[in-house]
Each structure stands twice: as structure tokens, then as C-alpha cells.
Amino acid sequence: MSDLNDQDLALKLFVVLSRATESVMKRVEEDIRTYELNTTEFAVLELLYHKGDQPIQKIGDKVLLASSSITYVVDKLEKKGLLTRRRCTEDRRVTYAAITDAGRALMDEIFPKHGEAIQGIFSVLDKDEKEQMIEQLRRLGFHAKGI
């Protein structure tokens, strides 16, 4: 591969990174579906589980979801009894999403299994390789964001 020029190498890296991301995401989505959730439902529950109540208007930014889709996802999770809406006492325009006891119990059960599934996906890499990849991808992401 060393005979590739810098542009060809960058293009190859883009293709390999894209395919790897697609494969990893496919496996993660398969794992999440076993819990009878879709990825956006899981992402919202995971956010509330780890970060506490969140303004519904801000959830989309935190889970990389269009704000138009958030209401739909929150409605579905509320119907499942996994979260509830709570009005802000200081600002009537703000409504919070809060995980319910049933939602917390579900996440207590499934999040460790999900973590194991992700660990299995990345088990092909040793600790040093994971740390190096985190640093390199972080650097790449910040660079891409800044140009």
C-alpha cells in the first residue's frame, strides 16, 4: 500500500473507515433490536439513564437526532412507560424528559449486556490499539470540524 500517493491513500482510508463504521453500527443496531428498542429510543433512554432529566428540546443535539423526530421518539417511549414528561417550574416553555422506574430497571438490565456486545465487537483490538485509535479518530474529527 505504500506505493499509493497521499490523495489515493486518503481516499482508501475514507472507504475503509466508512465500511468499518457501517459494519460496527450494523452489529450495534442488531444488539439494540434484541431489547425491542430502535437505536434512537435506546439513545434517548441511555442519555436519560446516565445524565438525568433533559429538556426535550435539547435531546436531539445530544443524541444526533433531528429535533423533528424527538417528539415522536419521546411519545413512543412514554407510551411504553419508559419515560415521562415533566414541566419546568421556572420556564413554562421547557419540558423535561425523565426516565421512569420501569425505564431505569430496563436499562439496569440491558446496558451491561449492551456494553459486553460492544466490547465483543472491538475485541479484535488490544488495549493499546483502542487507545491509539481513539486518539487518532478524535484528532481527525476535530480537524475535519475545523476546516
Image (tube, grey):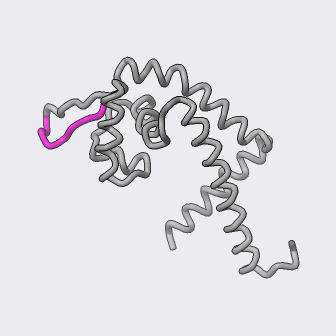
Residue 44 in which image quadrant: top left
Residue at image point 41% right, 33% down: 51
Per the image, is 8 magenta?
no
Question: Picture coordinates of residue 129 (x, y %)?
Answer: 77, 48
Q: Quadrant of the N terminus?
A: bottom right
* Image coords of residue 127 (percent x, y): 76, 40
Observer-nearest residue: 79 or 5?
79
In the shown orientation, is residue 123 left or right of residue 87?
A: right
Left or right, 53 with reference to 19: left
Q: 57 or 34: which is nearer to us?
A: 34
Q: Note whether 16 is above or below 126 in the view shown.
A: below
Which image quarter: residue 102?
Answer: top left
The stretch of residues the image draws in magenta is 90-99
**Location of residue 78 in the rendering, given as x and y in whole percent from the top left corner:** 31, 30
Q: Nearer the viewer, residue 10 or 74?
A: 74
Q: Where, by quadrant of the figure, is residue 29 drawn?
A: top right
Residue drawn at x 57%, y 61% is 141
Residue 93: within the magenta? yes
Locate residue 3 relative to residue 19 in the image: left or right: right
Instruction: Residue at 18% x, 32% y: name it.
Output: 87
Identify whether 37 is placed above or below 60. Answer: above
Tell whether 82 sits left or right of 122.
Answer: left
Q: Residue at x 69, y 55 (%)?
A: 20
Location of residue 98 in the rendering, given as x and y in whole percent from the top left corner: 31, 29
Image mark count: 0
From the viewer's side, name the closer residue of 140 and 99.
Answer: 99
